[in-house]
Amino acid sequence: MNEATEPTAEGLVLQRLRERFGDAVGTIKIWRHETTIVLATPDLVPVCLYLRDDSDLAFDFLSSVTGVDRWNLPDNSPRFEVVYHLYSIRFKRRLRLKVRVHEGEAVPSVTGVWESANWHEREVFDLFGVPFEGHPDLRRILMPDDWEGHPLRKDYPVQASPKWWEEEPA
Amino acid sequence: MTTARTMTLNMGPQHPSTHGVLRLVLELDGEMVVRCEPHIGYLHTGIEKGLESKRYQQGIPLTDRLDYLAPLSNNLVYVLAIEKALGIEVPERAQTIRVLMTELTRIKSHLVWLGTHAMDIGAMSVFLYCFRERERILDMYEAVSGQRMMSTYFRVGGLLADLPAGFEAQVQAFLADFPSRLAEYEALLTQNPLWRQRTVGIGTIRASDAIALGVSGPALRACGVAYDVRRANPYCGYERYQFDVPIGRVGDVYERYTVRIAEMRQSHRIALQALQRLTPGPINVVDPKLIPPPKKLLKTSMEALIHHFKLYCEGFNVPAGEVYQAIESPKGELGVYLVSDGTNRPHRVHYRAPSFVNLQALPRMAEGRLVADVIAVIGSLDIVLGEIDR
């Protein structure tokens, strides 16, 4: 495929980010030709705005936001990862951003950068219990409003007894 | 939330025009929609959680159940993500068959969309014609996999089995008929004044809004943005096929219709090229750790027996790491984010479901319009609740 051009494109993104944000741009991993940048939580929104608005980068399309629970992995502190998949329609480039948070710690919402983050962040909140600061409408999205627990956490059993199913006393 | 002037109407989750168990809370001022709020989750089945608890090969049948109108697209993106993490590429013939089957899947999915969308708006007969052609594609599914709907035909490292005898002729016969059938649907709708009144200028969305909302697939292309994953980031050798990416201009319900009709023509074109490219060859990678040995070897080769046993009892391990693989499903950008911890089960699988993201744009398209237009807009988004709720 077009892998030959990719390293330079990745290089451009990293170079720009380093120039603009210095060493605040965290760890960078490249695996299977995919770039992952781990950011500190406070840097998330400024970096996203920059990536969206810089005309040479133009990451205008947010593919998805999702979570990973590292509870049962060796490197499990902070426990949660929130993962952003960015795409530039003009340059046909993908980029993965990541922030890591402890349980209960909030992540700044990127709904102000990409509107589409709204439902994605609600889903992460619902299924992982990661709160998003500045989200306009942070509610559960897939599970019922009165559900207890967050199903995609690793300490949540695959077959859980649904408590909300029990009849309430009359 | 309801003022003296407005009324709240609960549409769904059991409403035939919401294409599944979608619930919309509409705030109405007379016939006018002031606010539209989708409520989802009625079909949440925990498929992502389920995939984490299953070995890689065992998970593939679960993925069929996401977008149940295009099961092979869900299979494809899952196996492509695993293959990317493994660092393998399947042989030429398998890639061509994957392209052929996913393009037929696109036609099949678009046929259900067209039939139901037209029926929602009141054109009953289109539905019958669309399902007549869809039936022939279901027969092809059955021929390759034994299953008409949930076929699970793609496997990590290749395919379940090679194409059966006579399959190419079956596809040829269908492809020979299909353009004339497509012309029949168009004769019923494209210039039909009633159809145009219900769709032209309805549910428009600007390209910039659509991009900000993450809309992909035909709904984005109808706004004039030529983003198609097959063209932008080719997989399965799509860069070797000749096809156009049809786009619209204003992004209304009518253009979403014309774009999908044009896409069916392109899928037909790609399927014909795929048939020409089909040359005999292996359909699986050569790796006994991934692909079960031929049945007849089990009785004569101890090694084959061990591989068979290990593969079905333990599966295979995927190197630790993370990948994101996107494909162009009939609904838009379908992506899988796969995190492997090095074991035989995925640590995390996330499906970036195009219907989920596209549905978020519904309020933008429906607010300020009539209730009847909401029906037309839902139909034009082509959502499947199976992949929205996962």
Image: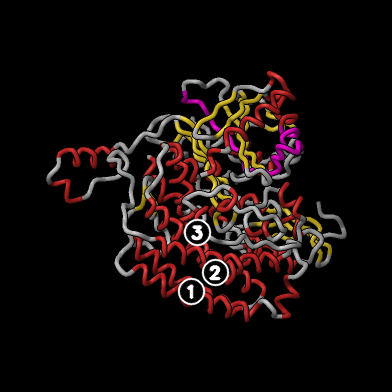
Q: Residue at x 72, y 30 (%)?
A: A47
- Residue tagged by mark 2? B111
Q: Chain of mark 1?
A: B
Q: Colour scheme in the image?
A: secondary structure
Q: Is residue B271 left or right of residue B264?
A: left
Pointer 2 with pointer 1, Cβ within 8 A: yes
- Along the viewing direction, whichever of B360 and A169 lies nearer the viewer: B360
* Magenta extent: A48-73
Q: Are dots 1 and 3 on a single chain?
A: yes
Q: Is residue B152 left or right of residue B119?
A: left
Q: Residue at x 47, y 42 (%)?
A: B81
Residue A15 coordinates in the image, percent (x, y): 67, 26
Give the residue type at disc 2.
Leu
Instruction: Specify which label sits upstream in the sequence, 1 or 3.
Output: 3
- Along the viewing direction, whichever of B217 and B14 lies nearer the viewer: B217
Pointer 2 with pointer 3, Cβ within 8 A: no
Q: Residue at x 61, y 39 (%)?
A: A94
SS for callout 2: helix
Residue B287 coordinates in the image, percent (x, y): 30, 40
- Residue tagged by mark 3? B70
Q: Is residue B334 left or right of residue B254?
A: left
Residue A130 coordinates in the image, percent (x, y): 63, 31
C-alpha span from label 2 to label 1: 8 Å
- Residue B250 sits in quarter: bottom right
